[in-house]
Image: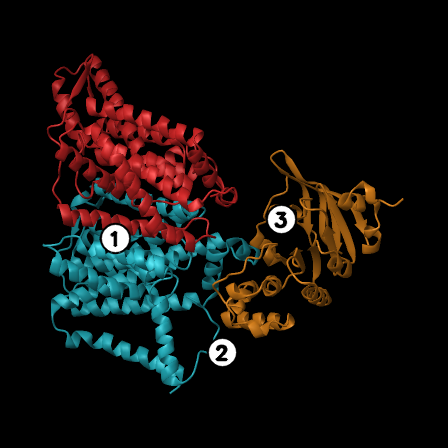
Chain colours: A orange, B red, C cyan
């Protein structure tokens, strides 16, 4: 069944149309990638799904239920989690504390939350840093923390907003493995990314956005050779035909 | 409160209570309220510049007014000049006072909290400055009320038909308007002024343009405090001077700035006039302290309904 | 001895000292000073639930003290209801007021929030000063209410000597500290910290930040009001300038800030350090150098904010922990680190 369905989503900011009649669906258990030039409207679309913005027009359905304008914390409780492009750790607290905040979605007891958080850290091979102050982590570790926190909320659908940005190639490969592992656990993943090697390796399907509109959709290889996509990224001169 | 005693005196001069006299009375109150209000606006003008540029609440604002009044007082007493001549001394003194206050005490906090949008610590620090200034003044100069008795403006009234208009307040009104225009011109037309406006809009972008943001903050604070000095000079001819005189103006200042809008010059003057009007008209219908309550209520309404004020630029507060 | 044992022993020793103090210290003047010290520690700790944990700067908390004081006093003077019950009634009233104030103000950012709380605090004070009678209730405006020291007894919350007051406020203080401790380690505590530090991230992690703040505010205002009743029963005279003043609000906030808001020990430490300063300078310099204690206050405030913005409890607790490490030969291990400050 479709875990996420977007119908003709439109988001306007005053006179600027950031997302233009976007429609897509995500099947349970798949990894959908979204790419597009900078400013194409990817993060805006994410924010409309994640409850940060209310759509100007169109509908968003999560697990069959309409979620237009539902607040982020309620979405999280329903099983929709996200990370932020610019990481937002609770810097003065430890890694474990950070993750526990997420764990509290599923429990009221601190001891239980602690246990769950430790489990999450183990899955991400991160438990050695559990007492480290979040403000002292490297960028790669902070990105991993973002994922850990979101994972702790036990989501059905995870939205990753450029979670590879700023990572070295080796770290990117590591992250790809982690995300694949998460899918194997049964979590559906929707990922925005700029780093091609990552998104090609990860995605079952890719959606390409340009000026707020969907210009291509399909398996990675197909999309990579799609004329419109090449035009959007590199300009007309590069189309081979 | 000052106003009430004066009104009682004026009221006693109106021997007949017919409709014309009452209308005159209200008109008189309105005019004097506008005049006094413009002075309030002038006191808040410095605050709005500082608030608008540095985005911080300067809780020491009232104390700066108090200090300026003492400076003006001593300047006038020792030289015996017309109060407004004291501007020559008060303005530069207060400019540098504000400049160095920002430089020495507030800047270190700013640097430490660079990433934080609204540094709460600055609020706390300026409150510390307030406590120190008010109480040092108390310690050094004592609690007694001072006033400049023999000055050319004190107690003078202008007769306008059947109404009596306060002369020192009229001078204050004129000064307020002139100062407002001067500051506006400065911010719009001069290089430094534009730098200040740039910094207030986006301090990082401004610093990339070669503007030293901390120097700008110092200058802005200096200018704001200099304007406070001007307002003090307008007050000194008719207002009492004592260590905690600033407290009244402190809260009023913030209310005016919020009413008129962060960083808006016209807003500050207009906000002040609104407060002045409420203060002079409301006591005709209720006790002075209920008038105070109205001011607070109005303040809260503005905060909730239109926090950017009458003329303020909308921030994502 | 293990580290944990030493820590626990220290607390037990402290408890002994606190409870045994009135047996040793017979002077009512000094007892009075210490009672007020505990009262301030209680007030700052209650304030901390909003001002520390929720990450905002409320500067109008004395309104809740006033609500508590007036509620219990009116109920006991006019209707003969025991102040203990009045205390709870005042607390509930304050909690409602706190929620009503919090609803619109928590949406505002730092500076505006602070101003709004000041306006609320002052607005309430001005209203009480203007009202002589609110329907059947006698409020007496600026003259305030006096409690005649007639019916002595526990049920009436009235005692001849200072000692019973000492123990009551001590128990209240310990209670509020324990409460704060448990909240900080509970889901609400985590949510408040998260919401205060990174509200957007917290919201995406399931935290209803606004609701958490309102709950904290309700708790804080309830607890603060209880202290209002204590104050009324202890001093036997309340009027708006004494229980609802801006100075009172500011003093509570700044003691908490100097001690270290957001931590549990901070507010108490602040009170322990600053109240003696203020008492001392008022007693010895009150007539010759009036206002000296406020100059000192202001200077300490500025210095602490520049050099130790997280409050004095940061260096002090580091020192304490180093001490514990040295004595026990162990270090902190295996505990979830709840506060880095």
Which residue is drawn at the image coordinates 83% and 55% (left, top)? A221
Which residue is drawn at the image coordinates 22% and 51% (left, top)? C74
Taking depth in this image into account, of C278 and A46 the one nearest to the observer is C278
Q: Is residue B55 visible?
A: no
- Helix, strand or loop at label 2? It is loop
| Relative image position of residue B207 (x, y in whole percent) | 49, 44
Q: How crowded is mark 1: few (under 14 residues within 10 Å), some or many (20 or more)?
A: some
Residue occupied by mark 2: C334
Q: In this view, does A151 lie above or below B249?
A: below
Q: CA gap, disc 2 to disc 3?
A: 38 Å
Q: CA gap, disc 1 to disc 3?
A: 44 Å
| Relative image position of residue B61 (x, y in whole percent) | 29, 42
Which residue is drawn at the image coordinates 14% and 61% (left, top)? C151
Q: Nearer the viewer, mark 2 or mark 1?
A: 2
Q: How crowded is mark 2: few (under 14 residues within 10 Å), some or many (20 or more)?
A: few
- Chain of the residue under the numbered disc 2 shown in the image: C
- Helix, strand or loop at label 1? It is helix
- Chain of the residue under the numbered disc 3 shown in the image: A
Give the number of the disc on residue A47.
3
Residue occupied by mark 1: C248
């Amino acid at each position: 069944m479709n875990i996420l369905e977007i119908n003709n989503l439109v988001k306007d900011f005053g006179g600027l149309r950031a997302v233009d009649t976007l429609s897509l669906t995500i099947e349970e258990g798949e990894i959908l990638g979204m790419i597009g030039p900078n400013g194409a409207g990817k993060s805006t679309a994410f924010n409309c799904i994640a409850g940060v913005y209310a759509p100007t027009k169109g509908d968003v359905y999560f697990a069959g239920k309409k979620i237009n304008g539902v607040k982020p914390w309620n979405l999280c409780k329903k099983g929709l989690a996200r990370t932020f492009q610019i990481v937002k750790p609770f810097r003065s607290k430890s890694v474990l504390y950070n993750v526990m905040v997420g764990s509290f979605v599923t429990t009221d007891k601190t001891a239980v939350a602690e246990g769950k958080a430790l489990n999450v850290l183990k899955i991400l091979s991160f438990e050695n840093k559990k007492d480290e102050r979040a403000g002292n982590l490297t960028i790669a570790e902070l990105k991993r923390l973002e994922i850990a926190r979101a994972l702790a909320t036990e989501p059905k659908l995870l939205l990753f907003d450029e979670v590879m940005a700023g990572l070295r190639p080796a770290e990117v490969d590591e992250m790809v493995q982690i995300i694949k592992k998460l899918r194997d656990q049964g979590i559906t993943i929707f990922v925005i990314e700029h780093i091609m090697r990552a998104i090609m390796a990860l995605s079952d399907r890719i959606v390409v956005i340009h000026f707020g509109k969907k210009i291509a959709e399909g398996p990675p290889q197909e999309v990579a050779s799609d004329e419109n996509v090449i035009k959007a990224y590199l300009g007309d001169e590069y189309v081979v035909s | 409160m000052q106003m009430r005693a004066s009104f009682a005196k004026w009221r006693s001069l109106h021997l007949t209570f017919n409709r014309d006299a009452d209308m005159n009375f209200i008109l008189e109150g309105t005019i004097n309220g506008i005049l006094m209000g413009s002075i309030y606006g002038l006191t808040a003008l410095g605050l709005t510049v500082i608030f608008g540029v540095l985005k911080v609440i300067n809780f020491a604002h009232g104390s700066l007014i108090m200090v300026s009044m003492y400076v003006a007082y001593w300047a006038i007493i020792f030289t015996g000049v017309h109060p407004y001549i004291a501007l020559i001394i008060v303005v530069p003194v207060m400019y540098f006072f504000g400049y160095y206050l920002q430089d020495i005490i507030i800047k270190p906090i700013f640097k430490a909290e660079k990433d934080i949008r609204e540094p709460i610590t600055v609020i706390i620090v300026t409150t510390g400055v307030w406590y120190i200034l008010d109480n040092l003044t108390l310690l050094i100069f004592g609690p007694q009320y001072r006033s400049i008795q023999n000055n050319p403006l004190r107690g003078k009234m202008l007769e306008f038909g059947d109404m009596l208009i306060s002369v020192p307040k009229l001078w204050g009104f004129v000064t307020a308007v002139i100062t407002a225009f001067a500051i506006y011109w400065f911010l719009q037309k001069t290089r430094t002024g534009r730098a200040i406006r740039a910094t207030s809009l986006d301090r990082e972008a401004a610093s990339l343009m070669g503007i030293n943001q901390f120097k700008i903050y110092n200058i802005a604070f200096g200018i704001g405090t200099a304007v406070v000095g001007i307002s003090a000079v307008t007050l000194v001819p008719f207002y009492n001077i004592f260590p905690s005189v600033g407290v009244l103006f402190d809260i009023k200042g913030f209310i005016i700035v919020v009413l008129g809008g962060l960083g808006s010059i016209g807003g500050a003057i207009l906000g002040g006039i609104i407060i002045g009007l409420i203060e002079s008209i409301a006591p005709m219908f209720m006790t002075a302290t209920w008038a105070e309550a109205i001011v607070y209520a109005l303040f809260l309404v503005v905060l909730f309904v239109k926090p950017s004020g009458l003329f303020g630029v909308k921030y994502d507060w | 001895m293990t580290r944990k044992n030493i820590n626990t022993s220290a607390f037990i020793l402290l408890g002994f000292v606190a409870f045994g103090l009135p047996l040793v210290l017979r002077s009512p003047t000094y007892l009075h000073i210490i009672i007020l010290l505990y009262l301030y520690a209680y007030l700052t700790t209650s304030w901390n639930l909003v001002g520390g944990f929720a990450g905002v700067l409320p500067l109008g908390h004395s309104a809740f003290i006033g609500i508590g004081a007036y509620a219990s006093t009116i109920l006991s003077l006019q209707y003969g209801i025991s102040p203990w019950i009045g205390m709870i009634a005042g607390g509930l009233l304050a909690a409602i007021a706190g929620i009503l104030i919090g609803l619109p103000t928590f949406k505002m950012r730092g500076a505006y929030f602070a101003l709004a709380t000041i306006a609320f605090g002052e607005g309430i004070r001005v209203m009480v000063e203007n009202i002589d009678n609110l329907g059947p209730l006698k409020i007496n405006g600026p003259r305030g209410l006096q409690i005649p020291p007639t019916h002595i007894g526990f049920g009436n919350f009235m005692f001849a000597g200072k000692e019973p007051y000492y123990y009551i406020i001590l128990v209240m203080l310990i209670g509020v500290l324990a409460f704060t401790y448990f909240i900080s380690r509970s889901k609400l505590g985590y949510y408040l910290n998260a919401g205060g530090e990174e509200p957007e991230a917290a919201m995406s992690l399931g935290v209803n930040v606004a609701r958490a703040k309102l709950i904290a505010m309700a708790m804080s205002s309830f607890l603060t009001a209880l202290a209002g009743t204590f104050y009324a029963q202890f001093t036997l005279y309340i009027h708006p300038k004494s229980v609802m003043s801006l100075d009172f609000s500011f003093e509570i906030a700044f003691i908490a800030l100097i001690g270290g808001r957001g931590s549990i020990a901070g507010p108490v430490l602040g009170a322990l350090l600053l109240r003696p300063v203020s008492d001392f300078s008022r007693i010895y310099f009150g007539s010759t150098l009036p206002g000296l204690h406020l100059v000192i206050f202001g200077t300490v405030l500025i210095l602490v904010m520049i050099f130790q913005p997280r409050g004095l409890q940061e260096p002090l607790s580091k020192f304490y922990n180093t001490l514990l490490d040295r004595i026990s030969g162990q270090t902190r291990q295996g505990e979830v680190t709840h506060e880095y400050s």
